[in-house]
Image: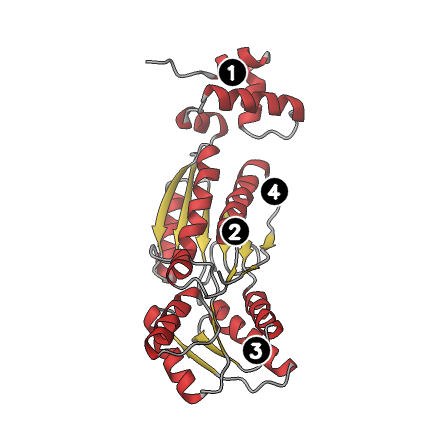
Amino acid sequence: MKKRPTISDIARLAGVGTTTVSRVLNRDPKVKPETRHRIEQIIAEAGYAPSPSARAMRTRRQQVVGIIVSRLDSASEHQAVRAMLPVLERAGYEVLLMESGFSSAKVVEHLDWLRLRQADGAILFAFTGLALDGQADWQDKLVVMARRYPGFSSVCYDDKGAITLMLEHLWRKGVRRPAYVGVELQDSTTGQQRLEAYLDFCHARGITPGYRLGGLSFHAGQEGARLLLTERPEADALVCASDTLALGAAKYLQQSGRQLPLTGVGNNELLHFLFPAVASVDLGYPQAGTAAARQLLAQIEQGRSIAELALPCRLVSAG
């Protein structure tokens, strides 16, 4: 069996002391860039991985990070988490995955447990109604996804920009009477902000708005499309607040035999596979996951300040 390389082996190969290798592993900014690059290259080639227990003793950290998702079956959160994991694991952290189920009480329970576990930090997927009161001790080691919370780092999506981008795309293609299938306004991002973008667009161009709001499911999209197009048969495009809704709406259009432009938000692989003619907006879920993990590591290991990060969106044209 091949012997696992040690920190002494890495130091010998790099021609430096073990202290310098340790500083590189702990992301000490005082290490010269050329030295850091050489050591990191040797580490990668040798397949060296620091012992979590030894590193915890050196740094007085447990090398544990929690990720609290709102629901385990969320396609968008799944994409973000998949991008977070390699960033955190390469840095030597054990990742604990938990689900809140959109419950503030459950979030508090999870944070309390992570606190008892002496976790180094956490990434939290926020939801409407979530309160972070009484969590001041997490301010320098928590990154919130999808919503801004004063005093905490956050990574947010451009919800309004996504709908505006899609509507402008349709307008350039000659669409003049777009209808909208959205989410109930209790949801402040997917619901309220995306509807506001649709209404603002209609107002700016003198369009009479037509929309239906409901849940965030395939069935809600199917039923919303049926009701909306029954009420507004003159609609010349159907804009959905999410790809999940667009999947349901596409099913309705397929069953009814009606053809008109249909769009979603989320760049969902299933939507593109089943209905390749449907355009979507990519909000950057994997990029958000990577950004959140890097921000958290920078706060934990380098003392970086709290930051609010906003990601741009991009149009994914119909195939």
| 3 or 2: mark nearer the eye | 3
Q: Is residue 279 visible to the viewer in this orientation of the structure?
A: yes
Are circles 3 and 2 on residues that touch, CB within 8 Å? no
Q: Tell which circle, 2 or 4, labels the residue nearer the N-terminal end.
A: 2
Distance between the alpha carbons at the discs numbered 2 and 1: 33 Å
**Residue denoted by label 2:** 288
Distance between the alpha carbons at the discs numbered 3 and 2: 32 Å
| 1 or 3: mark nearer the eye | 3
**Residue denoted by label 1:** 10
As helix, strand or loop, the secondary structure at mark 1 comes to helix
| 4 or 3: mark nearer the eye | 3
- Residue 76 in the image, given as x and y percentages of width and height: 43, 56
Depth check: give the residue in front, 129 or 49: 49
Depth check: give the residue in front, 206 or 54: 206
> In the rendered structure, which amino acid carries the disc numbered 4?
Arg
Q: Residue furthest bottom?
A: 231
- Residue 206 in the image, given as x and y percentages of width and height: 63, 86
As helix, strand or loop, the secondary structure at mark 3 comes to loop
- Residue 305 in the image, given as x and y percentages of width and height: 62, 46
Q: Tell me if residue 218 comes above or below residue 16 in the rendering.
A: below
> In the rendered structure, which amino acid carries the disc numbered 1?
Ile
**Residue denoted by label 3:** 175
Disc marking residue 304: 4
* 273 sits left or right of 155 in the view: left
